[in-house]
Image (cartoon, grey):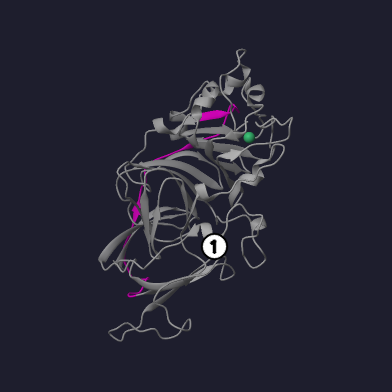
Amino acid sequence: MPYYRQVGEIPRKRHTQFRRPDGGLYAEELMGQEGFSSDSSLLYHRYPPTAILAATEFDPPAWSRTANRPLKPRHLLTHKVGVPGRDTVVGRAHLLANDDCRISYAVADQPSPLYRNAIGDECLYVEAGAARIESTFGALELTTGDYAIIPTSVIHRVVPTGDAPLRTLIIEATGHIGPPRRYLSVRGQYLEHAPYCERDLRGPGEPLLVDGEEVDVLVQHRRGWTRMTYARHPFDVVGWDGCLYPWAFSIHDFEPITGRVHQPPPVHQTFEGPNFVICSFVPRKVDYHPLAIPVPYNHHNVDSDEMLFYTGGNYEARKGSGIEQGSISLHPGGFTHGPQPGAVERSIGIEAFDELAVMVDTFRPLDLCDAGLECEDPGYAWTWARTAPATGVDTATG
Ligand SMILES: [Fe+2]
């Protein structure tokens, strides 16, 4: 996280005596990345964050992944996927995965268990509904269109707060997710060319100050899952400061970069993770050269698989490919993709695209998980070969 934040009570100097009203010492905890060489925060607990009473193995819902063979573009209809549960953590359906990340979808109307992902950061994107992420750092309110970045090992839970179910796309990394390096100064400030900046980011507010005993936390780690029983509730923090904490950013605060001719996907980049990037396609004016072709050229990003999640906008205009709200397209390396038949001609003269999509480009191939195959539209791969032009303009995917 590029900037410093302070919440609640902290001592004047770090690593010094900080006493509770009863005279006892608060327990200081440092959460830091990359072996004390990157972002960190200091948290002050009422009780030791180390006290566990039990640890038992936990089996999450079974899942599997299969290589994209035969190699072909895929279309997943997430609104038809069978989600295994009613919360955002254990109840997520895994759709796509490689050794760097896993992409899932959840439909939740129940609070998740307390959860710690010790493998990597998570990025949640709220397609619909509202939620509060409660963590050792406080509460972070989310609504439709919000991204939330939850750093590795932050104990948290996701609580749906809206009337409708909470629909989220979840990207689990095997490392850290943050803003692209090229958006930041050497000291971490967002630069003028970045499509968003510090004013657009939100962090947790006041500490939760939860008091409780014998509290279970599900820990996902590189060797599986464990249920740890903590002696005291981990949300007992009275204050913290630092540059590591859960944070949120609304896709609606992403300011699109446009040009006279078609701009390539890196202008849409929002975050970067280990071996993948996350981009936001938002409503925008399109290319204004007098001879511009607003839809993308056929393209083959030979080092990437390209996943696009369609999360808003006018999908009446995309009937030709079957894409609809909640669709995911996967255009893998080894396959050239581009506009659907007829889309290039139809796009000429269009001044604006009304679309909202989240893209994940991975630098290693994405496998298909069983839930992804379950909701696949099997005809998508052949939609470019139709002899009759499709009726719509496939804007973001090309
Ligand atoms: Fe593309």
Depth check, front residue: 95 or 13 = 13
Q: Is residue 65 left or right of residue 83?
A: right
Residue 346 locus on image (x, y percent): 63, 23
Whether 65 is among the magenta residues is yes
Relative to 390, residue 25 above or below = below
- Total numbered labels placed on residues in the image: 1
Is 49 rendered above or below residue 83?
below
Could you tell me which residue is drawn at 73 percent across and 32 percent down?
290
- One can see residue 42 in this view: no
Is residue 68 rendered magenta in the image?
Answer: yes
Tell me which corner region of the image, top left, top right, bottom left or bottom right, holds residue 129.
top left
Residue 355 percent location from the top left of the image: 53, 36
Residue highlighted by disc 1: 1
Horizontal and vertical percent position of residue 184 = 64, 60
Q: In which quarter of the image is the C terminus?
A: top right
Judging depth in this view, the residue of 94 and 284 nearest the camera is 284
Say which quadrant the N terminus sits in.
bottom right
As shown in the figure, which amino acid type bears the numbered disc 1? Met
Between residues 189 and 120, which one lies in front from this camera angle?
189
Name the one closer to the observer, 272 or 204: 204
Q: In which quarter of the image is ligand 1?
A: top right
- Tell me the magenta residue range: 46-75
SS at badge 1: loop
- Residue 181 spot, x, y in % from top left: 65, 57
